[in-house]
């Protein structure tokens, strides 16, 4: 498996070396700053002035008079890109889903459309359903630590989503205001709740419940944008909302290494179309009040559009977070989080490269550490936990109907602090998920499959997964000596994920 991942990385690098000289002039926005993505769902509706502050180009402060917009021809697929790293071309108005219209099908239908074409209001909705074929048929009905499609040989209605909002627009000069509210019902709710928010109105069940990942207001002045409330974290390449990502299954790095949401105040300043810097004061990882964490935290964000083909983004997260040092695994029934708080630092780097009109690649690196986060199973003394990994993505727009993706991942959980049981949690106290945890080792994954559009509003995703674990067996006293897959018996697994999305 290590060799397979290395081959993907080498192939990605060779493609970069040969294709860069031939790549056309395509805008590539930094992926990690896009805290919410609407490329697949609103490409025909959202003009550049309707994009979020992180996506829309802003003029320099000295150019307060907005320039006349020039409409460029829509050439497949340079105007729109799928997934969290996607991009709507700044001058393109006719893209769907990858830059061209499907003959005889027209545009995607919207349940609610603004009365004016230049309206800053927009709505987004979808229903996402999936089924995972796991040939091992594990006795606990879980696909090991694989999420969000975590149930084996079972149907999941992952998300019934609806949201609306108003994006800010200043053209680099003046004041404006905006807001965003998104809520969904489904099995994915278990990971998208925030401690002290959804728990206060009892919306969560064993597998199905309600989550509200976005609920914020926004004020913009010239090149400043300030967001206050609850918002999706800008970390990494994947994001909340399954249809915003290419594959229906998410990487280990995202599920176990990164926060999903924050509650706080986030300020962004655009120095130019090429460079944006931001910072936030938050209540930590997936936390709204003192229910799960009484301490504060912070974000540092920076994006750099290197040229028309390349971009680089950085996000750093810091603060005191729950650890697992309060209960000794040898004398208790397991390891319980929330018994103490120590300093945690996490960072992610995302590099995006467009090789041609139809090929795009992404490299992501993650690193996290937390002081005295977990007991050493041998000595019984607390030790520092570390988690880090690499992701390589390669996407190909074969036609306007067919898109293909390839992902290779390595995620190292040094200390066995991150991978495993993540629900129930403070935000989803009634939820059920994988019971195994505390795997001190490396996880490897290869994911491959297509996305096919039946109509502008309906598409299907198929993903073949090969997962492999190289490390120690679980040292959790509740599941001692178990492995991650097949109800604790295997260190590898192959699955086939089928997914169907209808947008509205």
Image (cartoon, rainbow, N blue to C red):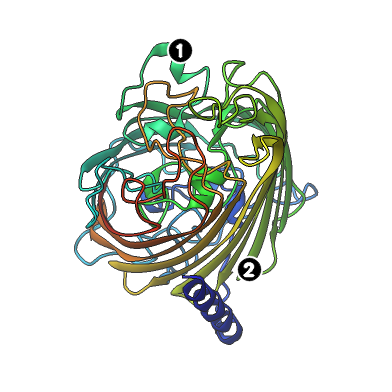
Q: Position of residue 386 (x, y in %)?
A: 66, 47
* Disc 2 crowd, CA 10 A, few/some/many (<14, 14-19, 20+): many
Residue at 25% in and 55% down: 459
- Depth order, front residue of 481/357: 481
Distance between the alpha carbons at the discs numbered 1 and 2: 44 Å
Q: Is residue 257 left or right of residue 199?
A: right
Tell me, yes or no, whether the two marked residues, 1 and 2, touch with CB atoms within 8 Å: no
- Identify the element where label 1 is drawn: helix
Instruction: Provide residue 122's location: percent of width, then percent of height.
Output: 42, 37
Residue receiving disc 2: 310
- Residue nearer the viewer, 165 or 170: 165
Residue 181 can be seen in this image: no
* Quarter occupied by residue 317: top right
Instruction: Tell which circle, 1 or 2, labels the residue nearer the N-terminal end.
Output: 1
- Residue 366: x and y in percent read 63, 54
Rendered-image quadrant of the C terminus = top left
Q: Is residue 447 left or right of residue 11?
A: left
- The reply to whether residue 411 is visible in this rendering is yes
Q: Residues within 10 Å of mark 1 (few under 14, many from 20)?
A: few
- Quarter holding residue 269: top right
Label annotation for residue 29:
none
Residue under the point 41% across and 49% down: 484
Indicate which label's residue lies in the foreground, 1 or 2. Answer: 1
What is the residue that sits farthest to the right in this orientation?
A: 62
- Vertical comparison of 201 with 455: above or below: above
Q: How many marks?
A: 2
The residue at the point 62 percent across, 16 percent down is 290
Task: Report the residue marked by disc 1.
Answer: 200
Label 2, secondary structure: give it: strand
Residue 226 in picture, x, y percent from top left? 68, 32
């Amino acid at each position: 498996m290590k060799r397979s991942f290395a081959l993907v990385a080498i192939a990605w690098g060779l493609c970069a070396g040969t294709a860069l000289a031939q790549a056309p002039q395509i805008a590539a926005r930094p992926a990690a700053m896009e805290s919410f993505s609407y490329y697949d769902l609103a490409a025909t509706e959202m003009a550049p002035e309707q994009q979020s502050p992180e996506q829309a180009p802003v003029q320099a402060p000295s150019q307060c008079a907005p320039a006349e917009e020039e409409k460029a021809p829509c050439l497949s697929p340079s105007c729109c890109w799928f997934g969290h790293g996607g991009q709507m071309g700044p001058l393109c108005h006719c893209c769907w889903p990858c830059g061209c219209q499907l003959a005889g099908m027209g545009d995607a239908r919207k349940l609610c459309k603004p009365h004016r074409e230049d309206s800053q209001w927009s709505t987004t909705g979808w229903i996402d359903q999936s089924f995972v074929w796991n040939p091992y048929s594990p006795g606990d009905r879980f696909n090991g630590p694989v999420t969000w499609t975590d149930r084996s040989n079972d149907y999941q209605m992952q998300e019934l989503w609806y949201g609306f909002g108003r994006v800010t627009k200043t053209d680099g000069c003046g004041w404006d205001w905006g807001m965003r509210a998104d809520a969904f019902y489904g099995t994915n709710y278990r990971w998208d709740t925030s401690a002290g928010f959804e728990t206060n109105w009892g919306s969560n069940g064993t597998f199905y419940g309600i989550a509200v990942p976005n609920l914020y207001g926004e004020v913009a002045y010239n090149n400043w944008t300030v967001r206050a409330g609850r918002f999706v974290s800008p970390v990494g390449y994947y994001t909340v909302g399954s249809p915003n990502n290419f594959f229906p299954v998410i990487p280990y790095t995202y599920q176990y290494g990164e926060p999903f949401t924050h509650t706080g105040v986030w300020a962004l300043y655009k120095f130019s179309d090429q460079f944006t810097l931001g910072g936030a004061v938050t209540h930590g990882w997936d936390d709204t009040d003192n229910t799960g964490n009484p301490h504060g935290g912070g974000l540092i964000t920076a994006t750099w559009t290197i040229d028309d083909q390349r971009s680089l983004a950085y996000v750093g997260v810091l603060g005191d977070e729950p650890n697992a040092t309060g209960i000794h695994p040898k004398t208790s029934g397991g390891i319980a989080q929330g018994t103490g708080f120590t300093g945690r630092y996490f960072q992610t780097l995302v590099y995006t490269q467009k090789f041609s009109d139809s090929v795009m690649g992404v490299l992501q690196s993650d690193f996290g550490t937390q002081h005295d986060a977990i007991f050493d199973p041998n000595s019984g003394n607390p030790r520092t936990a570390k988690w880090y990994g690499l992701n390589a993505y390669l996407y190909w727009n074969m036609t306007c109907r067919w898109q293909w993706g390839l992902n290779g991942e390595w995620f190292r959980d040094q200390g066995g602090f991150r991978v495993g049981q993540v629900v129930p949690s403070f935000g989803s106290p009634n939820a059920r998920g994988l019971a195994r945890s505390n795997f001190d080792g490396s996880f490897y994954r290869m994911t491959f499959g297509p996305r096919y559009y039946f109509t502008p509003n309906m598409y299907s995703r198929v993903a073949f997964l090969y997962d492999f674990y190289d490390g120690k067996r679980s040292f959790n006293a509740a599941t001692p000596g178990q492995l991650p897959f097949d109800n604790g018996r295997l260190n590898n697994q192959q699955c086939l994920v089928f997914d169907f999305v209808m947008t509205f």
